[in-house]
Image: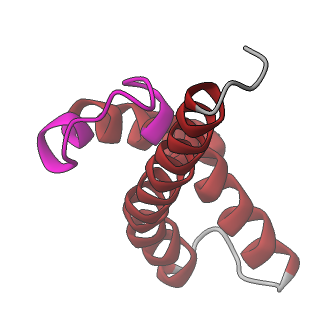
Amino acid sequence: MEIAVIVVYALILALVVPFVLPPSDHYGRLVPAGIALIGGCVIWLALTWLGLNYQEAWIWLAVMLGMPAIAWFGTRALDRIRKKQELERLEQIRLGGKA
C-alpha cells in the first residue's frame, strides 16, 4: 500500500515538473516522473533495509524530498548527456562518417 502512495506522488510530480524544469527536446514529458518513481522506490527500499519502519516520519520525509531532487538532477544529467551525444553525432556526420 505504501508503494501506491509513492506512485501517486510520482504522478503529482509528473503534473508539476513541466512547469518547473526548463523544456527540452531531449526527453519526453513522463521521463522526469519515471526517474522520480524509480528513485523513490530505491530510497524506500534502502531505508526499509536499514530498518526504518513505515510508521516513522523519516522514511516518508526522505522519499518525499528525495523524489523531486532525483527528478531534477536526473533529468538535468540526462539532458546534458543527450545533448553531448547529439553534438558528437552531428560532428561525426559533418566529417563524413557513416550515418
Is 35 rendered above or below residue 60?
Answer: above
- Residue at 37% over, 59% down: 72
Side of 42 relative to 74 (left or right): right
| Image quadrant in which the N terminus is located | top right
Considering every residue shown, the one lying at the far left of the view is 19
Q: Position of residue 76 (x, y in %)?
A: 41, 57
Q: Nearer the viewer, residue 28 or 96?
A: 96
Q: Position of residue 13 (x, y in %)?
A: 32, 42
Q: Which scheme is used to colour this image of the protein? A: secondary structure
| Image quadrant in which the C terminus is located | top right
Q: Nearer the viewer, residue 48 or 20?
A: 20
- Residue at 19% over, 46% down: 22
Q: Position of residue 67 (x, y in %)?
A: 46, 60
Residue 1 drawn in magenta: no
Is 84 rendered above or below residue 31?
Answer: below
Q: Which residues are magenta?
A: 16-32
Q: Quadrant of residue 4?
A: top right
Q: Quadrant of residue 50?
A: bottom right
Q: Nearer the viewer, residue 19 or 87?
A: 87
